[in-house]
Amino acid sequence: MMQQPNLNIALSQLNVKVGDLAGNRRLILDAIQEANNQGVHLLVFTELAVCGYPPEDLLFHQQFLDDCYASIKTIAEQVGDLAVVIGFPRNHPNEPELLHNSAALMQDGEIKMIYDKHKLPNYLVFDEKRYFTPGSHDGIAELTLNGQRLRIGITICEDIWYDAEPVAHQAEQGVDLLVNISASPYAAGKIGSRIDMLQWRAKTFATPLVYCNLVGGQDELIFDGTSCALDAAGELVLLAPSFEAAFSTVNFAHSQGPVAEPETPLAELYDALVTCTRDYFQKNGFTQAVLGLSGGIDSALTAVIAADAIGAENVTGVLMPSKYSSDHSVTDAQLLADTLGIHSQLVPIKPMHNAFHEFLEPLFNDLYDDYFHRQTDENIQARIRGVLLMAFSNNNNAILLCTSNKSETAVGYTTLYGDMAGGFAPIKDLFKLQVYALCEYRNGIDPAGPVIPANTLSKPPSAELRPDQKDSDSLPEYAVLDGILEAYLHRHKDAAQIAKAMNQDLDLVIKVLKMVDRNEYKRQQAAPGPRVTQMAFGKDRRMPITNGFRHDASD
């Protein structure tokens, strides 16, 4: 086993689209042409690059699988003496009812070897056991590259995580290079921990390692790319950029590739949100966005993300003050729109609100006490705004962006068919304090100066649906609420554990947890949005709507 193979290696982290086999193939063939132009010997693509990841129930259609195989054959015919490793789904050759998540090794116009993924993740957003069967091939290929006879170990994503048995076996057999193709979704803090894991693998196995990861947004999932190469000592010799397609080259023997500067946590998080929002629009053929601008922090961050993702000229903010809206709410919202350069419309809702009151008041007499009457009135205002925004959306072929954050969605401090209306929710997986932090971050990086008004950042948050209303009237302060929610949702702690760890009143913690559970029915009707934690509402956290468990029960 040579210590540092003398090979020109390229990692192509492409932003492919699930199901777009022709479009993905064009991107792949362009990268192959680029590799040939640059004298590359080994070109590595990502997991399921041919069809995109995750293809989900498209895998149940045989035509889809046949088309994927036809695409991989077409690609193989055009690789020449370049060696290419690329991911695709396939039927088992002897038992076609079984499917594999596979990697093809191509050279000289043909497929030299196929490796089937051994470790199939079945947790968080992953559901691979629903579709795939584990493989058994050892993934070791022998081929001649740049005049050298080399042994290369090929694995797919999960195979290198946790116990990493497939990679460990390859290292024990003696290989010159470890290759892992991946589609590892982004979550805050994951990039650094992933690189640490890969460095430890390369050092432990004393073998150079290249890792090529998918990039781009796919519905709620975000793939950060950040492909890398590590030498036999575990040192980074190549680090591709995060959140952008890249073609990066390295030669372990005599040249270090580019090593991208790691982003700060807030920069990384913000770029992830913009990437997912941009790709949701582009990959689904949408060009215009509309949202309600309240002068508050959530709509401000949503507007800025949208403008950065698809261009300010393609975003419209609708200001819809009610009789309870403060003057500064309108001026703050208009200042944001003007500074950001998005379109704006002013539509006061007081006349519509009065009309609803006139026609609905007889229905409410003797039916509701004061609390429910007040709550009904608040929800009517939110739903008036939802109707106006959806009308604008329909009339202008614009996607309505929902501005709800994770803190409020968790406890049901949202209105179905009102402020929850929308086709995409860019800040869905952000706690309230993260919203503030990202607004401060975005203000700090704009060369033209802050775009989010100072008053928006400093005033107490309020829905402004009744006189002098503040969020703190109904909820704990967000510093407390976010801590309780993070412990319950992300770390699965129970009420007593949370109260003790946070030194909080147990009754308050139980109240918050009950609010979370009671509002599951709302969350399961919510718009999709970028997943930036490893316990987002949706595919990560799967709770029953009908749920009789009580946090304060003694048995």
Image (cartoon, rainbow, N blue to C red):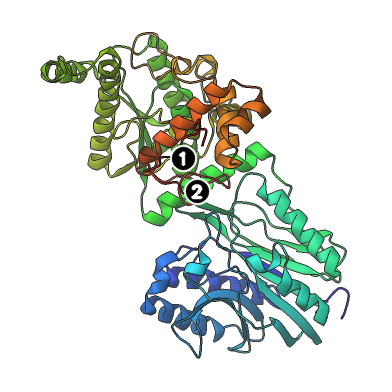
Establish if 127 lies above or below 106. Answer: above
Residue at coordinates 54% horizontally, 17% vertically from top-left? Answer: 454
Residue at coordinates 78% horizontally, 83% vertically from top-left? Answer: 151
Q: Residues within 10 Å of mark 1 (few under 14, many from 20)?
A: many
Do the numbered discs 2 and 1 sit on residues whose CB atoms are within 8 Å? yes
Kindly identify which residue carries mark 1. 426
Quick one: label 2 or label 1, which is nearer the N terminus? 2
Q: Which mark is residue 511?
A: none
Percent from the top left, x then y, of residue 313? 40, 37
Q: Please state which amino acid type lies under the numbered disc 1.
A: Pro
Q: Residues within 10 Å of mark 2 (few under 14, many from 20)?
A: many
Q: Is residue 323 visible?
A: yes
Q: Please state which amino acid type lies under the numbered disc 2.
A: Cys
Percent from the top left, x then y, of residue 99? 49, 78
- Check the image and name the residue furthest to the front: 555
Say whether residue 14 is left or right of residue 96.
Answer: right
Viewer-nearest residue: 185 or 25: 185
Kindly identify which residue carries mark 2. 276
Percent from the top left, x then y, of residue 437? 60, 28
Establish if 228 lies above or below 76. Answer: above
Which picture quadrant has residue 420? top left
Which picture quadrant has residue 389? top left
* Label 1 secondary element: loop
